[in-house]
Amino acid sequence: MQQHISRPRVAVDAVVLAALVVGAGLAFGPAYGGSRYLLTLGLGALLGAVAAAVPVLLRWPGWMTLPIAAVGYLLVGPVAATPTVATAGVLPSLESTRLLARGVISSWKQMLTIAVPVGDFGALLLPAFLLALLLTTAAVLVALRTSVPLLALLGPVLMGIGAAAFGTTTAVAPAIAGTALGLAGLVWAAWRRRASGKPGLELRRPTALALLVIPAVAAGALLTPVLAPAADRAVLRTEVVPPFDASKIESTLKSYRGYVRKTPNDVEVVLGGVPKGGLFLGMSTMTDYNGLLMSVNDASGRFAPIGGQLNSDGDTPGQQVQLTVQVQDYSGPWVFTAGQLRSLKFTGARANQLQQGLFYNRDTGSALVRPDLQNGDGYRLATSVPTTVGLDDLSASKGLQVDTSVPIPTATNVPTEVRQRANDWGGDSTDPTDITRALLTATSQEHGWWSHGASGEPASAGGHGADRIRALLTNDTMYGDAEQYSVAAALMLWERKIPARVVMGFRPTDAGTVTLRGKDMTAWVEVPFRGRGWLPLDPNPSEQKPPPTQKPGEAPSAAAQNTLQNPPPPIPATTQQQKTQDQPKKPSQASKSKQAQQEQTSQQSSSSSFPWWLLLVIAGALLLVLLPLLVIWLLKRRRRKRLATGPPERRIAGGWTYLMGSARDFGRTVRPGATRSEIAKEWYSRPPGSKTAGSRSAAAPVSAPAAAAPGQPAADRGSGVALLARDADTQVFAPDPVPQQAADAYWAAVDRELASLRRAHTPVQRLRAMLSLRSLRADRQRKGSGR
């Protein structure tokens, strides 16, 4: 039998080890951001300490820790690890139970692939909760149930290693944290040895304190290289490649003419919170040109999953803005954003699904989501919007200097006319800011005119391939729209060694809530400036600018720009592709209807199968908890049946054995080898003032009788036990056969005595006796001894 451990020592061990595990888990801080993870660590460590300590206090077998931890995991997990999907943020829900079941395996990888700080969405807090729960449980079990309790300090050590591995290369005061945890662990170890009667340090002596502090400082110094920030510090996050490559998504500029000409009046999104002066609401950022398309490349296509919250870089000044976006006719993977994103939270029926599929590119400020956005979706975003600058503001005297340290993309199949125009219009200046202003002024004010090529407008072919850009730049009177001007401006800036990128989206100018339609779609370029980050610049001419050969108010004349020149030999034929570029890229009504039916069927299928899968998980968890209890109940039921069957004298002996086994379950100690009469006398040997039956006092190994039931004198109840002992001896050793009625009467008397014994105990003590294995172990020992 396990040696009894005092309650204060159990409490100290559990509290100290749980606190050490939480302290070691502080290394999770940079990965999670904020302070919400501290509650997760605390609840996980608390649950682990309770699951390991309660069976010790109640003298339950060690395996009872497993069902307590399992039940606690399902009940405490929602508030600790999945608060965003829990009912009222606290109570279990179907979604929180599903995430807790799946997250045991999937949450580890998810946390490593989400951009830091990962936040608290979905099951992202589950790794911290699981580590705190498992390591605290293991540490407390080692401290309370093994002969080497000091090995429990491995729990906090493993927690620190795990938190650092799943964290970032930035640590939180590692030297201080390591020293404090080392000192606390050594203090507990010294106290634990002395509490166990073993030699240990006397903390009141200076020499002992020195022997304690010096190893603690050494431990902190040794742990610092592991936890301290360093450029070459290895963490798992740096070894995991995000699973999404946006460069495989088709160029959004191909769909530009589809928005402005085919669906000009469709309400794409409704934007709320627009500040005074407007903003640039980007859809996708493109930095790769191959002579056919401007698209996302490997550099601008590195998208990492995020939990919705992002760290502020602190180097992009601007206005703090809260925006709301409600999707209507728009459908696609790209998420409209503005400026430097700080947080993005989806709303609507698919909020949880979309939040888990959100990806963000810190370099370009673009975001996308899987599955695609559709009507009814919405989101709120907090962002830092840079101050809008005009071409007249581009000068070093006004504090704007182009940051030429940013890498310039490598374009292929660029027409030679791009370099010629870049040199002609950029002038002889060597200042990048002056060159930028000159080139954008040439396209927007001096040489460019606006036309979508629609009915009543000057002819203007769609597309932005090499032949279309050549045709645009070789005409003194340039006709085009945002698709051509943004690409032409970016290519000319690259030729002059100026970093730039193309962004497609909306540019609302009215403050408040605005409705953005297909005809409002546009594109622009962004250029990096020192101390300001990437700033949007508009290379497009005004739509109200009259053609050069047309007086104001006259009808527009045809232009010869619809005849494209032949492409150069190295550029593949693009006639058919240029035609398809002018086609609307938005899905037709038939395809939308088919897609909606497919999604509805998929949702119905998933919704019909999901509850059954979830019920299986819940049933499995309940079975894990209830199965051991059911096994104990069945074994005790089988024991009673076995002892109550057979010849009458055997049944009577079995009744006495059953009574003694039940007494053991209530904590009584029955002296091995004692006769029935001796046991009956010891049953009443309780001295005045001693504890009642079922107590676990080490000073009274022989148990005392239970308190008398209401209305029954103690002497009467006690005489029943003595009579049971005498009758058993008389009947078992009687020379004459014993009738079955005598055995039935004996068992009835045993049941009455047991009922009285149960009434003398509290419900918790009765539950503890029901789960006790002492009676079963006593039977096994009796069989082994041949008695």
Image: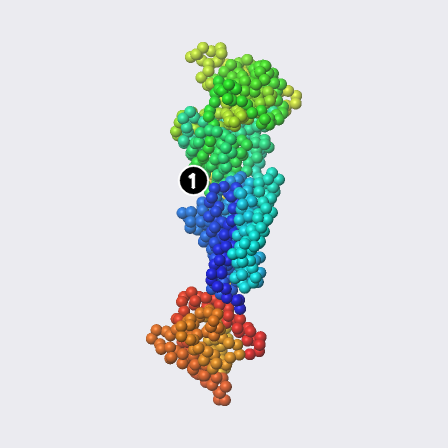
- In the image, taking residue 494 as reference, residue 704 lies left or right, namely left
Q: Residue furthest left?
A: 711
Q: Is residue 766 visible?
A: yes
Q: In the image, what residue type sits under mark 1?
A: Gly
Q: Is residue 668 visible?
A: no
Q: Residue furthest bottom?
A: 735
Q: Which residue lies at the image location 51% right of the left edge and 27% below the top edge?
A: 532
Q: Which residue lies at the image location 54% right of the left edge and 45% below the top edge?
A: 176
Q: How is the image coloured?
A: rainbow
Please tell me whether residue 451 is drawn above or below residue 154 in the rendered image: above
Please tell me whether residue 39 is drawn above or below residue 465 in the rendered image: below
Return the residue nearer the eye: 223 or 293: 223
Instruction: Provide the residue designation for mark 1.
Output: 348
Q: Residue furthest front?
A: 206
Return the residue nearer the eye: 336 or 533: 533
Q: Quadrant of the C terminus?
A: bottom right
Q: Toward which corner of the image does residue 279 lie, by quadrant? A: top left
Q: How many marks?
A: 1
Residue 502 placement (x, y as % from top left) = 54, 26
Residue neighbourhood size for the residue with mark 1, other residues' Cα within 10 Å, grouped as few (<14), some (14–19), many (≥20) = few
Q: Which residue lies at the image location 47% right of the left edge and 79% below the top edge?
A: 679
